[in-house]
Amino acid sequence: MVGSFLCWNCHFISKTALISLLTFTSLFTSVRIFSQDHSQQKGRLKDLTINDSKIALIIKDMSLDEKIAMLHGNGMFSSAGISRFGISDLKYTDGPFGIREELERNSWNPLKLTTDSATFFPTGSALAATWNPEIAYLLGTALGEEAKARGKDVLLGPAINITRIPTGGRTFEYLSEDPLLNARLAVGYIKGVQDRGVAACVKHFALNNQETNRGNVNVIVDERTMREIYLRPFEAAVREANVFAVMAAYNKISGSWCSENDIILNKILKKEWGFNGFVVSDWGGTHSSVRASINGLDVEMGTQRNAYLGKSLLDSVNKGLVPIEVINDKVRRILRVRLLIEPVNEAKTADIVSTPSHARIAYQVASQSIVLLKNSAHILPLDLNKIRKIAVIGDNSTHKLASGGFGAGVKARYEVTPLQGLINKIGNKASVKFAQGYRPSFIMNQQSGVRRMPNNMVDSTLLKEAVDLARTSDIAVIFAGTNREFETEGSDRSDLKLPFGQDELIKAIASVSSATIVVFVAGAPLEMSNVLNSCTAMLISWFNGSEGGNAIADVLLGNVNPSGKLPFTFPVALNDSPAYSLGTFTNDNNAEYREGSLIGYRWFDTKKIKPLFSFGFGLSYTGFLYRDLKTDKSKYGKNDSIQIHIELKNTGKMDGDEVVQLYVHRSNSKVEWPEKELKGFSRVSLKAGESKKVTLSLSVSQLQYWDTKIHDWKLESGEVQLMIGSSSSDIRLVKNIMIK
Ligand code: BGC
């Protein structure tokens, strides 16, 4: 390192080099001192600007080449530090549901190591179905620890785009259709990751709500909807969780690519929200040198050769097209993160990465996420005193979900499938037999020749085997749904139908078995009306991670009382959902969000369309009684916080969790609003028969709307109805309050 300061021929140190060396030594010492401080004083990690005076010295001493070298990838998942100052490269990893396997430095090819496996954590929609920000925090800490153990500095997650269309290919990675639910979970996740000394990188900023044509699609959305729905979770990630990095999305907004969009990157993210970290492009999502650098992109990734923020940017600076202060600002932002994140030089092995405590966290998320959709005649939980023979049917009984399809996956250290989970938990208390039932295969779409379509032909041999097994068993548990090949980054589903001939399979099983339980393993909404009446019980169990099989077995057997709530609406038919109903989801280059803020339940409630299952819905093996809604006052001013109290009673014989949901409805507003909006929630654990007082706080500022005349938040006075419920369509208590 020091060699670069020496004049090799004459063996003396030049004057500039000497100054550099002295500066370097003092910087290095202060970086080290800082690192020591930081472990003792966690709060400091939260202040990204704490090293700015040191960074100013570093920048002063850097050449333009050194600066530019930091602004683009020097490998598929790394970007340069400053070796002269002993400042390490930044190492990135996907995200969001586990640490990705190691790839070759300059390609997407796996290195095929034996030391890079990790815990497969439940994916975004599973996390969202827990409605539990504390568990999101725990998940974040586990991800942070695994990233650290693998020597990574930046975790590319959480992925928090709003699920605008139910067919979205990445719905399984994303969280929900509601900005508040997304925001609360994202804040928990990010704090968890960053408390373990790894930078979270929230993605994809912004309005990347479809995979179809994602690299080109131009989103046209009104300003109020953008602020109230799509930007809100990102704003919380910056303002509340102090996220260190933000990934610019592939798409365009109002004609300008997100990676070179002055409004969202400079004006909103950096200036208005005060974001001090750095903006990284999505992989291969940069389109220019001058525009991208001036308009707010700091690091270009995915393009090692001929990077826009490489030689071409250097030339642009030399030609005076990009001011040096723009470059310095980028370096400053990267260094802020770099100096806070202690580099790990030696990555540890899989044994240290995937620990029993991480497995416990994966299990907790999974067991809180499973949603009970139907339970006729209380068939669940299964009573092993009465059941001798269990038929476990369906490819998803044994299908692994940690990887598959396009995009990031995890080389799971292990993954317990539903069949294995049931065998683990049932032991010799009953016989468990398996039949595959359907084959998840694909055919090429003849027209496009590219898009793979599910092969929906029933496999008659597999079907017969499954029907025979069900006929001779006491109950049939079918693990149906999708998989990671079917729900994937890079493409959206063409409809919500159950693929691979599963409707026929479920109906055939139900015709011979009076006890048919269907567990949908999927990351997104499905059309279920065809089979709803055929089955006795129905659940959804997401892409639920390494412990997913144990969690679903515990729910079926009643060791765990289901408490997950749907994070998005399940429509009866695809055309009931807003973008399909209005025809605004197409292959076109323009995606006009004409539904405005009426996303998900906001649309279904306002338009009075009954969904199959509502946002926030989920049954339990016990019952909950809501009563006695009180507020601390009846009139509130703009700086107040509304304290809402209710009493919640577990009326059944089993302990359980309920997610109490607070929605608001505006009575006589001059402004247009959706019928109702989620404004708070709380997961409450109650023993059988227990009652608890539950308090929800809602700050009045959360009731503001984005006023497009003043381009700012504004509070309207008048009456607001507070609605407390068990789902968006099951409101149990109502009270009106006044905003002064
Ligand atoms: C995805 C990102 C991901 C990146 C690196 C892109 O295709 O959109 O979410 O982090 O690849 O794998």
Image: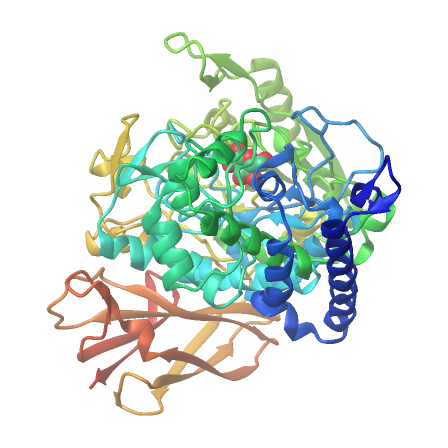
Q: State whether residue 100 is above or below residue 616.
A: above
| Front-lying residue, 426 or 23 | 23
Give residue 460's quadrant in the image: top right
| Spot occupied by residue 45 in the image (x, y as percentages of width and height) | 64, 68
**Figure quadrant of the N terminus:** top right
Residue located 73% across and 56% down the image: 19
Q: State whether residue 85 is above or below residue 463.
A: below
| Front-lying residue, 140 or 251 | 251
Q: Is residue 734 visible?
A: yes
Split into quadrants, the picture shows ligand 1 in the one at: top right
Q: How many marks?
A: 0
Q: State whether residue 407 is above or below residue 151.
A: above
Left or right: where does residue 322 sit relative to residue 154? left
Residue located 51% across and 35% down the image: 314
| Spot occupied by residue 364 in the image (x, y as percentages of width and height) | 67, 59
**Figure quadrant of the C terminus:** bottom left
Left or right: where does residue 161 sit relative to residue 35? left
| Spot occupied by residue 718 in the image (x, y as percentages of width and height) | 16, 80
Residue located 53% across and 83% down the image: 691
Q: Is residue 558 visible?
A: no
Residue found farthest to the right:
11
Residue found farthest to the bottom:
633
| Front-lying residue, 251 or 636 | 251
Colour basis: rainbow
| Spot occupied by residue 417 in the image (x, y as percentages of width and height) | 71, 39
Left or right: where does residue 21 sit relative to residue 410? right
